[in-house]
Image (cartoon, rainbow, N blue to C red):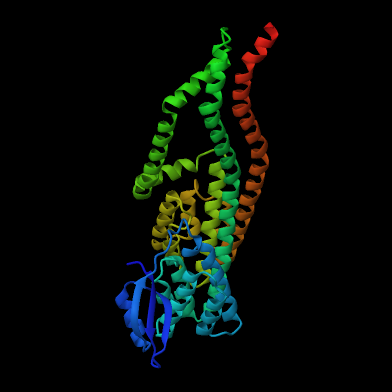
């Protein structure tokens, strides 16, 4: 059951009126917590907030969790007690939902819960995060584990930003081109069509094609666009629930000429980075493989990771198991894992492999951005320029006749 934000008002032991906000599952839970604090509640109501997509301050983002993790690791390494560290972090946070999140964690830890159990009560912390914190608490090295976890999340987010930046420019240019074309077909071409009708001469083939496209667009273009949007929305929701479709989609995406190569290296970088972080925290290899099955976001890699875990439980080494998945993991990954297992420094070799492929992804994104810019300009020129040329071609021919 998700938690909601409640506004409360009550009287303390001195009969003074105090107000506040609290994250809880229900009004009864808020009243119970206030009673434990010896506050007699007079009014409790749920705070109405805007949807998360309208108000970014009403949701916890991945970047927020990364920042909190980094701050908590720094404070613990400086010798600050855990409860005091929560107080310091809460004072520096501006988003109300983050303040309530940190205060709730502090209250749970203060009441005797372990930190990893307190984290599991909030959806903002995934199973991987909680498992790492649990390993750090059991080993007595919570500050070190949080430091590695913060480093891991920062690297993963930097990789995601690099991938998104490679897609933002071409997608934005394509969307703008389609909007301009829709406006031309809806308003500009019909105006020119009325002018051409008064010429009484045969129009060029290019102009006739543009006019026919405009008529088709006006008769059912917007409905077709709406149907495509509805189909895309339905396909997205279908793909989230259908495992076989996810596997088919992710397998074929990896086979694409340029994008597939980039996504493959990005998955390898994320997979090796996460496995290195877990293994360095003292988690066994089989448990670590179970925890990272969904870390790449690719169903094909999740299936391969489950297969690797099964092979390790049967007594095979990681390098030997990786050889059965050569289409997903490159020879360099297999070789680095073999060296790491033989030398007893598997976490170090996995970290080096992750660094290599992160640099590969950044270099590929930079090359793609350099090549895509002139290519998109050519495409934009052909689409918009070709349509404008089709509209002015009859006028030029009329001028030659005169």
Residue 127's place in the image compared with 386, above or below, is: below
Does residue 203 appear left or right of residue 297 in this picture?
right
Q: Pinpoint residue 253: horizontal percent, then vertical percent.
A: 48, 42
Q: Nearer the viewer, residue 330 or 107?
A: 107
* Quadrant in which the C terminus is drawn: top right
Q: Nearer the viewer, residue 205 or 139?
A: 205
Residue 282's place in the image compared with 249, above or below, is: below
Q: Is residue 127 visible?
A: yes
Residue 107's place in the image compared with 162, above or below, is: below
Q: Pinpoint residue 229: horizontal percent, then vertical percent.
A: 42, 39
* Quadrant in which the N terminus is drawn: bottom left
Q: Residue at x 67, y 36 (%)?
A: 374
Q: Nearer the viewer, residue 42 or 172?
A: 42
Q: Pinpoint residue 54: horizontal percent, then vertical percent.
A: 47, 56
Q: Residue at x 50, y 40 (%)?
A: 255
The quarter of the displayed image where residue 269 is located: bottom right
Q: Pinpoint residue 61: horizontal percent, then vertical percent.
A: 50, 62
Outermost residue to the left? 28
The number of callouts visible is 0
Outermost residue to the bottom? 14
Does residue 75 appear left or right of residue 61 in this picture?
right
Q: Is residue 339 visible?
A: no
């Amino acid at each position: 059951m998700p938690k909601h934000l409640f506004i409360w008002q009550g009287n303390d032991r001195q009969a003074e009126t105090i107000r506040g906000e609290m994250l809880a599952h229900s009004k009864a839970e808020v009243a119970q917590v206030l009673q434990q604090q010896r506050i007699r509640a007079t009014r409790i109501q749920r705070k109405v907030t805007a949807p998360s997509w309208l108000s970014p301050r009403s949701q916890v983002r991945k970047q927020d969790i990364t920042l909190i993790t980094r701050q908590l690791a720094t404070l613990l390494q400086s010798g600050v007690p855990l409860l005091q560290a929560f107080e310091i972090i809460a004072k520096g946070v501006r988003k109300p939902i983050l303040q309530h999140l940190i205060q709730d964690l502090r209250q749970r830890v203060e009441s005797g819960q372990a930190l990893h159990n307190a984290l599991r009560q909030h959806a903002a912390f995934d199973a991987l995060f909680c498992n790492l914190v649990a390993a750090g608490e059991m080993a007595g090295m919570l500050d070190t584990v949080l430091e590695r976890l913060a480093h891991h999340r920062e690297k993963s987010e930097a990789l995601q930003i690099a991938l998104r930046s490679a897609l933002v420019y071409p997608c934005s240019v394509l969307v703008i081109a389609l909007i301009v074309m829709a406006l031309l077909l809806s308003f500009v071409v019909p105006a020119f069509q009325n002018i051409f009708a008064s010429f009484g001469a045969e129009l060029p083939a290019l102009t006739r094609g543009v006019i026919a496209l405009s008529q088709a667009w006006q008769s059912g273009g917007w409905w077709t666009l709406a149907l495509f949007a509805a189909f895309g929305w339905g396909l997205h929701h279908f793909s989230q629930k259908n495992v076989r479709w996810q596997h088919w989609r992710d397998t074929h995406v990896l086979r694409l000429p340029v994008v597939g190569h980039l996504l493959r290296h990005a998955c390898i970088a994320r997979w090796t980075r996460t496995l290195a972080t877990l293994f360095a925290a003292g988690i066994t290899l089989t448990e670590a493989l179970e925890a990272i099955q969904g870390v790449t976001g690719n169903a094909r890699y999740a299936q391969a990771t489950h297969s690797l875990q099964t092979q390790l439980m049967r007594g095979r080494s990681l390098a030997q198991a990786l050889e059965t998945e050569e289409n997903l993991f490159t020879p360099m990954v297999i070789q680095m894992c073999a060296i790491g297992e033989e030398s007893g420094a598997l976490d170090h070799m996995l970290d080096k492999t992750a660094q290599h492929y992160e640099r590969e992804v950044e270099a590929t994104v930079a090359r793609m951005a350099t090549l895509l810019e002139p290519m998109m300009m050519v495409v934009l020129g052909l689409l918009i320029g070709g349509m404008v040329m089709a509209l002015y071609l009859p006028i030029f021919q009329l001028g030659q006749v005169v």
